[in-house]
Image: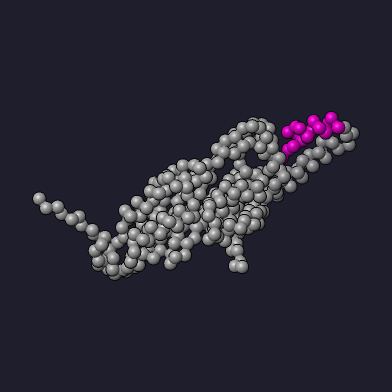
Amino acid sequence: MNALTLPDVAAQASRQALPLDWVGMCGIAVPVLIDGQRLNAIADAGVSLDDGEARGIHMSRLYLALEVLENTALSPRLLRRILQQFLDSHAGLSHAASLGIRTDLLLKRPALVSPLAGWKRYPINIEAQLKNDVFHVELNIQIPYSSTCPCSAALARQLIQQQFVDDFANKALDHAGILAWLGSSQGIVATPHSQRSTATVNVKLNASVDELPLLSFINEAEAALGTAVQTAVKRADEQAFALANGQNLMFCEDAARRLSMALRRSPDIASLDVRVVHAESLHAHDAVAQSRWVREAL
């Protein structure tokens, strides 16, 4: 019995000659190694189809090129190597390749005061592209934090002042009485509103960067904001968190400026896009601010 050659339909000529910008696969399940962690990730892989006469690409070649992610730490160098393999396996068909990887970076964060600690999730998206031998990597990181409205804080202080006037008018002031008043719901009649907020940081890395500086970007962002959300806490931690919010009142505009100014100092960044969303507890809509910056060429 003669063995039959399996047909390669993708190698056949297209009935409608037309180049395509991108052809590939989305939603590929892959493991990745980031900062010593093996994480479950989703990848999108593809190439351009520049030969309009070609019926299609060889998707299995892209899929097999991703196997290296399982045992090699993710880095710009590895991403370029994979993209080059995409192109080498499609010589004559493609001049551009891209790879996107989405996962959640898990970081163990200490409490503010107590010895407790817990894991926090940071959604990240890594996009790499190699086109006409030009390579670049972009990082997209979501960072949760708390924001307390400065206007609400001022209005709450005014109400407390008015309550103080009402309660102590024409009365002799004594230390014990004022202290008791400050610790009662009768005295602190209003509190400012705060909300869980999210900063989305999109960074284009300089070509010279060898590592993915995810942790350093997250740390710099949380330090600039001053009110990172917590994991495991005791009452002392919750009180310290309330103090941090009181000392870091911010509108969404303040948060966007803080983040943008802090991250611009990093030499690893070629361009930066910061978007902050304050999920309002007062309004039924969100407050949003955005900042874009591109490093000037030397």
Horizontal side of 5 relative to 29 (left or right) equals left
Horizontal side of 20 relative to 229 (left or right) equals left
**At x 61% / y 47%, what residue is drawn?**
219
116 or 147, which lies in front? 116
**Looking at the rendering, which quadrant does residue 56 occupy?**
bottom left
Assess whether residue 111 is covered by the magenta stretch.
Answer: no
Pinpoint residue 59: horizontal percent, then vertical percent.
32, 55
Total residue callouts: 0
64 or 226, which lies in front? 64
- The quadrant of the rendering that contains the C terminus is bottom right
**At x 62% / y 50%, what residue is drawn?**
221
**Looking at the rendering, which quadrant does residue 245 occupy?**
top right
**Looking at the rendering, which quadrant does residue 170 occupy?**
top right
Residue 273 in sight in this render: no
Pinpoint residue 97: horizontal percent, then vertical percent.
40, 60
Magenta-drawn segment: 175-191
Task: Answer above or below: position of 110 versus 254.
Answer: above
